[in-house]
Amino acid sequence: MKQARRWATSRWAGRLIFLVVLLATLAVALQMRDAVADRWLDHEVSQQGARVVDQIDHVFDTTARMLAEADRSTHADCSAEELRRLRAVFMRAKFTKDLGRYVGGNLACTAVLGVLAKPVVPRQEPLVLAAGLTGYWTALSLTDRDSFALVVRTEKSGFQLDLDAFRVTRSPGLYYVVGLRDRATRLVIGLDAQDSPGFVEAGKGQGREDGRFCSRRFPICATVLVTAVADERAWTSAMWMVLILGGLLGTCLGWLALAAHRRWSALPARMRRALAAGRFALRYQPIVALETSPRIVSAEALIRWIDGPASPEVFIAEAERAGMIAEVTAFVVRTVLDENRKLFEAFPDFRVTINVSSPELVDGSLMETLDFHWPPGLPRRHIGFELTERSTAELQDILPELERLRWLGHPIYVDDFGSGYSSLSQLQHLPIDYIKVDRSLLPEAAAQLQGSILPEILAIARRLEAGLVFEGVETGEQARMLACADQRVLAQGWYFGRPDTAEALARTMMSGASAAA
């Protein structure tokens, strides 16, 4: 379980989350592939249909304009001058195979064939295309009796359209046919066997019908046909699209998930969760009075993170940096009061010291915690506060709060003396009761006592009228050396006991009291 929790907050877990989010996003995107392919194909079909309709409008607009020019002729019908004019208009016209003149409703002459030996009588009912414009959908061609022609005419003139006029650029795999909007016909304009525009049988195109698009000005429509080539192209395009967009989106979401994981796995966030889950605990290290028979007079409360990823030095510093040291101190105060109430009642002079930092003194959060959690009737002397020597650099800011704590009855300690930045002039302005001497200033053996500054430390304590607690006492020789001092000193270290639970501390003190009795 411990390894699992550590792995869950590791960089590899964050990378795995990134990869999972990326792959999940790609999987969701791939599920949308068919829908994207359909939309892609619909777009291609719409574009193809729009191009054909635009061409239909262009062809009939141009034809109507040229027919109007032919109708303006003032020459006699089918005269030599008339034929020259018809041919001149025919040469300028686009999309046409021939231009003819109608006399009495019958075709009498054309620009290509000249005067017909016998006027041609239309065999179809004319289609109304627009105001003053009619046509014949499948008229017999005069030049090729085996083929049909599309004829557009006015009352006097008529064009035989070149069906190639309806050719437009095709998207790969798409075809189209052109037919009448309001009348079903056997033949429509499409691509013949030679891939050239011509009349082909309706319903026998080169693909399935997938969209009908009609001109708004002429009763002509285009039907787009879709082949397997277009389906495959749409599927391939959709695949690349969802892979690219899914990859980009997955990457963005993966980075967001990775950032969230890093924030979640950051030490302050993990500390808050650990506090809420009860994964912090206190251990108590005895502080002993060096008398004829050493006895425990107090203990320092040390916070521990059960199966945590960082040592107390690291996570306490991070708590101060992240502005959550007040939450940690509130937990320590609450736990000390809960676990040691019986010891406080059994030993009226026993106290537990708690480490505090200058930010909690400056912002008043420590006093708020004490006011909220302190039980009625319990003397304040049972809890002392250890102030790190580094915090004394902010003397002017913390002094009022220290004086208030001391006035309430809480003993004040300066911790790690000799390792920080305080000077004697600063210490003499602090309302302190005890000085805790850093282990680096304690000689390891009596032979080193002569060159040590231990006598000066004892003199400083006497001058400040403060008690002394020597930290890091690990051997009997160090304990005996301190016991020989000509003033009362306290000691703390592994020689007297390692940090242990409140229950273990209570058993030790009770057994010591029984032995003394």
Image (cartoon, helix red, strand yellow):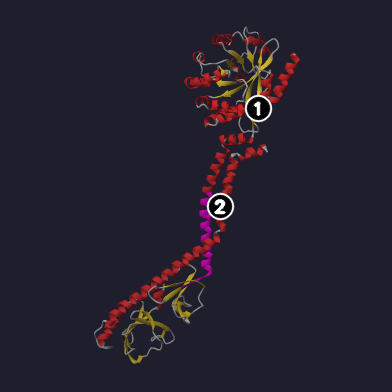
- Near-viewer residue (483 or 476): 483
Instruction: Name the residue at 47% across, 64% down.
Output: 43
Q: What's under tag 2, amino acid-wise?
A: Thr
- Mark 2: give few (<14), some (14-19) or many (20+) Cα within 10 Å: many
- Near-viewer residue (381 or 177): 381
Q: Position of residue 197 (x, y in %)?
A: 43, 77
Q: Position of residue 73 (x, y in %)?
A: 25, 83
Q: Position of residue 297 (x, y in %)?
A: 66, 16
Residue 141 appears in the rendering: yes
**Does 79 sit above or below residue 294?**
below
In the rendered structure, find residue 397 and report the number of the disc placed on it: none
* Label 1 element class: helix
Compare marks 2 and 1 and give the one earlier in the sequence: 2
In the rendered structure, find residue 25 and report the number of the disc placed on it: 2
- Near-viewer residue (168 or 415): 415
Distance from label 2 to label 1 (Cα)? 50 Å
Q: Position of residue 196 (x, y in %)?
A: 44, 76
